[in-house]
Amino acid sequence: MDLGYAEIATCPAFFFDDRYSRLPSRYLRERSSGDWEHQLFHSERAPEVLSPQSQRNCGYHLKNFLEYCSTLHLDPSKMNYKHVIRYQNDMAEGRWSAKGRNLAPSTANIRADEATSYLAWLPARRHRMKFKVSVRYKRSTFSRFGRPQIIPTRAQRKTERQTGLQVLQLPEQPMVDDWLINVRHKRGESKMYNARLVVETGLRLTESCSLIVSQWPTRSEIEKAEQRRQEFVNLTVTITKGSKPRVVLVTVEFAKLVTFWIEQKDPDSWTYIAAGQATCSRKPICFRRRRF
């Protein structure tokens, strides 16, 4: 594990006719470690290791594409970008679908994205002639250092429909304050603080439930932030969806409030902190000591 294999220990592999398939398996290893995506888009970010679930998803997407090639007698070493668009359209229009139904544009896009990535990887590793990818640039919905990012994306992707509930009206601050008061009255102070933390930082339920007292900003850290007239202090979350620690910003005012509350409590007490287990069920659970 110290040799760098831990990050790809959960990476799937390909076998055809009970024989190990070298190229697709090697591609998945590089995708899992984050090295190939980093090279494909010439990103300035450090490579990001995919989670085990994302590794499996990439494997299933590539498997679908290779089965498509086998069925239509297409050789990946001779395909061009028009073949990728055909593959994408065949899925969206139900011609390549297990149940013969039109697949969602998002499904067709993500599978065609993986096919494009694989076909671009082959010449990068000298396994075929150059594969030309049609690329366009779009403005990202996420910003970096306060500036929107312009990111490359594959051209001719299917237009994805907007899904989910339409937001008609967001609650105003007085409504949020009243809700938190009701949470404290009905569920207790600990759950109220946890609810406020989720609202203000956007943490997931399992992330906020997994916090322990030692992770919360200390009084000295808060005082330093006040001396520097900073509005926020850092909170490092170690248990995350992708198992990679990340930092969120907590207002100094809220950090002080929780720190004072922690100091007033019995450090050996058992505390209910949220309505939810690690599986996000709605049953309240009593977490182990030194959680808040």
Image: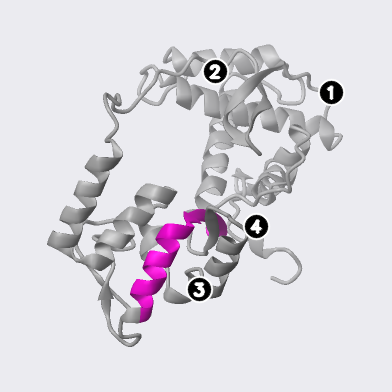
Q: CA distance from mark 4 to mark 1?
A: 27 Å
* Residue for point 19% across, 66% down: 188
Q: Which residue is mark 2?
A: 88
Question: 9 or 278, which lies in front?
Answer: 278
Instruction: Find the distance from the CA under tag 1 to the CA under tag 2.
Output: 21 Å
What residue span does the magenta drawing correspond to? 242-263
Tell me the residue that label 1 is attached to. Answer: 130
| Residue 258 spot, x, y in % from top left | 38, 67
Answer with mark 2 or mark 3, whichever residue precedes in sequence. Answer: 2
The local secondary structure at tag 4 comes to: helix
Q: Amino acid at mark 2?
A: Gln
Give the residue number, with chain letter if any, for mark 4: 8
Check if residue 219 falls in the magenta segment: no
What's the distance in space between the residues labelled 2 and 4, CA to CA?
28 Å
- In the image, what residue type sits under mark 1? Lys
Going by the numbered disc 4, the residue's amino acid type is Ile
Q: Given this view, does label 2 or label 3 mark the residue nearer the observer?
A: 3
Name the residue at 78% across, 34% down. 42
Distance from Cα at disc 4 to Cα at disc 3: 40 Å
- Marks 3 and 1, how far apart at CA: 58 Å
Q: Which of the labelled discs sits on residue 219, or is there none?
A: 3
Q: Are marks 2 and 3 in contact (CB under 8 Å)?
A: no
Mark sitting earlier along the chain (1/2): 2
Q: Are marks 4 and 1 in contact (CB under 8 Å)?
A: no
- Name which of mark 4 and mark 1 comes first in the sequence: 4
Badge 2: how crowded within 10 Å, few (<14), some, or many (20+)? Answer: many
Label 3 SS: helix
Marker disc for residue 36: none
Give, as a three-letter code, the residue at label 3: Arg
Mark 3 or mark 4, which is nearer the start of the sequence? 4
Q: Is residue 250 visible?
A: yes
